[in-house]
């Protein structure tokens, strides 16, 4: 009987928000606007699909810039995540990253943590590395997209228990499609998530105990 742990990436497995870091590369004005849109979506005030394409069009990140964010993720990984996930997998849990971030930036972090499954948003680039759009069919680029992923993975794996861990509104709304939502507040403590989650932690060191590991 499979048990499935779904984990957000930005401000959860890593201290940074990848889209905000890409915005920072475009200067203070673009960074401020991108960060504003990100916070509105993460706090639940703005539907994710309202800002997703707008942020990318504002930044138009290149392939090499996305690779830079991959390096930032690795440099800012949650310090207790590797050991906690090792224990959780050893107890038989399946682990997947479910994120509205970008697949190309997240994969190196996932590999470093031993996570084989990444459900995120793929980017498209021209031959010269210029931005050429994103995969608009990816569930996690829109509201309740993580719910769709949770349902699909539960069915695919025959999971008897599904737990979601994350810092944002898109993680909290997985309630109902996950058996439990655990809010995460080490890097960004959002009152709505803290109030609405089934449990709230500030370190991955706390996670095995909540999963009975």
Image (spheres, rainbow, N blue to C red):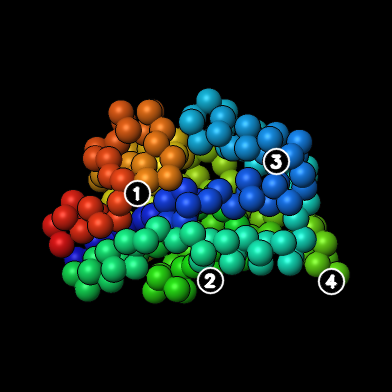
Position in image of residue 181 (x %, y %): 30, 43
Disc nearer the start of the sequence (1/2): 2
Q: Are marks 4 and 2 in contact (CB under 8 Å)?
A: no
Q: What residue is shown with label 1?
A: 165
Per the image, label 2 sits on a secondary structure element best described as helix
Quadrant in which the N terminus appears: bottom left
Graded by Cα atoms within 10 Å as few (under 14), some (14 to 19) or many (20 or more), the crowding at tag 1 reads many
Q: Whole-percent x and y of residue 198?
A: 24, 38
Rendering coords of residue 141 (x, y %): 59, 46
Q: Residue at x 32, y 61 (%)?
A: 80
- Label 4, residues with CA under 10 Å away: few <14, some 14-19, many ≥20: few
- Residue most toward the top? 45
Q: For residue 209, which quarter of the picture?
A: bottom left
What residue is disc 2 on? 108
Q: CA distance from mark 1 to mark 4?
A: 36 Å
Asked if residue 100 lies left or right of residue 163, the reply is right
SS class, disc 3: helix
Q: Residue at x 63, y 37 (%)?
A: 35
- Disc on the earlier residue, 1 or 4: 4
State whether residue 155 appears in this view. no
Q: Which residue is mark 3?
A: 31
- Judged left or right of residue 147, residue 71 is right
Give the alpha-carbon distance from disc 1 to disc 3, as whole Å: 27 Å
Residue marked by disc 4: 127
Cα gap from disc 3 to disc 4, whole angstroms: 27 Å
In the picture provided, is 129 more to the left or to the right than 49? right
């Amino acid at each position: 009987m499979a048990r499935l742990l779904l984990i957000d990436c930005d401000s959860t497995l890593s201290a940074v928000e990848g889209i905000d870091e890409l915005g920072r590369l475009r200067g203070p004005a673009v960074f401020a606007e991108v960060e504003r849109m990100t916070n509105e979506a993460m706090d639940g005030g703005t539907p994710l699909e309202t800002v997703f394409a707008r942020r990318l069009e504002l930044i138009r990140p290149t392939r090499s810039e996305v690779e830079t964010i991959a390096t930032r993720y690795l440099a800012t990984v949650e310090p207790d995540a590797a050991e906690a996930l090792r224990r959780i997998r050893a107890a038989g849990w399946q682990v997947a990253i479910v994120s509205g971030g970008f697949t190309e930036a997240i994969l190196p972090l996932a590999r470093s943590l031993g996570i084989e499954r990444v459900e995120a948003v793929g980017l498209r680039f021209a031959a010269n590395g210029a931005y050429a759009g994103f995969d608009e069919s990816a569930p996690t680029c829109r509201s309740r997209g993580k719910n769709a992923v949770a349902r699909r993975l539960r069915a695919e794996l025959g999971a008897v228990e599904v737990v979601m861990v994350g810092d944002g509104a898109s993680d909290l709304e997985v309630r109902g499609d996950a058996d439990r939502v655990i809010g995460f507040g080490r890097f960004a403590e959002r009152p709505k998530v803290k109030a609405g989650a089934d449990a709230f932690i500030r370190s991955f060191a706390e996670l095995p105990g909540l999963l009975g590991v």
